[in-house]
Amino acid sequence: MRAYLLLILVGILPVVAAAQEKPAVIVLTDIGGDSDDEQSLVRLLLYSDQLDLKALCATSRLGHGHDTKPELILNQVKAYGKIYPNLQLHSGGYPKPEYLESVIKDGQGDPASLGEGFDTEASAFIFETIDKADHPVHVIIWGGQRELAQALWKARKVKSKEELASFCKKIQVHAIGDQDRHREWIMNDFRDIRYIAAGFIFPGNFGLRQVATFRGMYMTGDVSMQDRQWVEAHVHGHGPLSECYPLDGHGTDGMKEGDSPSFLGLLANGLNMPEKPEWGGWGGRFRLLSGNLYIDAHDFLDGTLNERHTVSRWRPAFQNAFRARLDWCTSPYAEANHAPEVTVNGLPGTAPLEVRAKPGETLRFDASPTTDPDRDELSFRWFWYDELSGGGSCIPLKTSSGGKKCSVRLPGRVPGDTVHLILEVTDTGTPVLTSYRRIVIHTGQ
């Protein structure tokens, strides 16, 4: 849940920042099928300091075989254990390897069978975890949804109508495609679940390639940071976990990681807001279609409008961040890079700032206290997230103090009554790292 903690003034305008907790995450992976699941798991483990990993569930390999491969998850967790002491030098939030081993749960090889007598270790653990939770649980689905579907079947069997609604309201699903065809049943029978359907537009289990948000992980935009040579040069050679990263994704030269957007949007980088999929971020941007169903939205990039751009526009930043965390596996703190720590108007942290303002007023933002852990020089870029701001780029931005300060004079009418101003701060380390701060300006009543 989000608790509002801080209140200051910008001129006469209240600015509120929300404290962000680690998102609780359950992973369902058909690891052992498409090799990109193994790629995504390496990246996930390197970001496990920012996530509250509740379960790593091995699900059916679907078209690759009606079986499961939990041993592939265990192999990576064992490799993680070997670099864990070094990761701790860079972030104290990494979970212990023994804990991660304890939350590896096995599912069922048959993706279709559901109901009485088909509970598994994974489905039972999903049910128990959600049942005990007092905050949102993000269920990210890289393969089939059967284990979640079985947990929901059990919940409906043992709970009253009111209890089931409460149970479902705690769940946010981010599903990459609809690989075992359980999506329609889940959406129709459990409508209190917030459901992000990446690749929703049919035909097929993954929708149209040209408009599937998650394919922005490796398609469109700057593709120079993902081919086989890039993997060899920047991923491999960073200890045992990096060697678990397959050289190629299925049908792709080098990095594919089509599943990674499901958790990249959960990371606390100042841009993402996990429970606001419509706001966009490293994991893509989604639009509310009806009820609690979110589907792929589109952004502009290089003069074109496409759903994949909502991920690929951030690729240079998230690939550099991946490189830095790979360095954390083997390098001491002083020999690796760490992201800038952004402060705006005295408010540190990564949570968005929400401003209530009146049309015609001037707002002033000061990021001068922003620091870099490695004492690198910093550059500052302020820009409108146009797709959320009704053409907000027509509102002039005036910067000063080397970009550290920004003033905005709102027009007499703000399209949509809300605009999103993004501050992007980049250091000069190797690789260069970027942090953000999102400022949401509301002018409506």
Image (tube, helix red, strand yellow):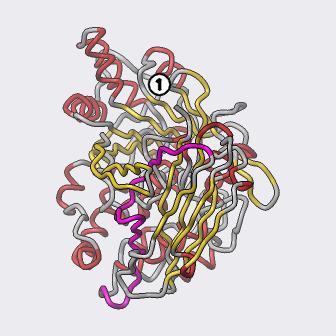
Q: Quadrant of the N terminus?
A: top left
Q: Is residue 129 above or below residue 15?
A: above
The residue under the point 28% across, 11% down is 162
Q: Give the x, y percent position of residue 255.
A: 59, 65
Q: Is residue 349 above or below residue 178?
A: below
Q: Which residues are magenta?
A: 333-359
Question: Left or right of 109: which side holds 362?
Answer: right
Query: In the displayed image of the protein, which residue is found farthest to the bottom?
Result: 335
**Residue 61 point in image, percent of width and height:** 48, 42
Q: Tell me the kind of residue under disc 1.
A: Ala
Q: Is residue 206 left or right of residue 120?
A: right
Q: Position of residue 233 (x, y in %)?
A: 55, 83
Question: Which residue position is annotated with label 1?
Answer: 112
Q: Nearer the viewer, residue 431 or 129?
A: 431
Quarter holding residue 136: top left
Question: Does any portion of residue 276 appear in the rendered image?
Answer: yes
Q: Is residue 338 magenta?
A: yes
In this view of the protein, which residue sits in the foreground, 80 or 72? 80
Q: Residue at x 53, y 52 (%)?
A: 283
Which of 356 and 263 lies nearest the eye of the viewer? 356
**As drawn, 233 above or below 187:** below
Residue at x-position 44% and y-position 87%: 376
Along the line of sight, the residue nearer the viewer: 357 or 404: 357
Horizontal side, residue 304 vs residue 145: left or right = right
Assign a secondary structure to mark 1.
loop
Label 1 Cα neighbours within 10 Å, binned few <14 / some 14-19 / many ≥20: some
Residue 325 visible, this orientation: no
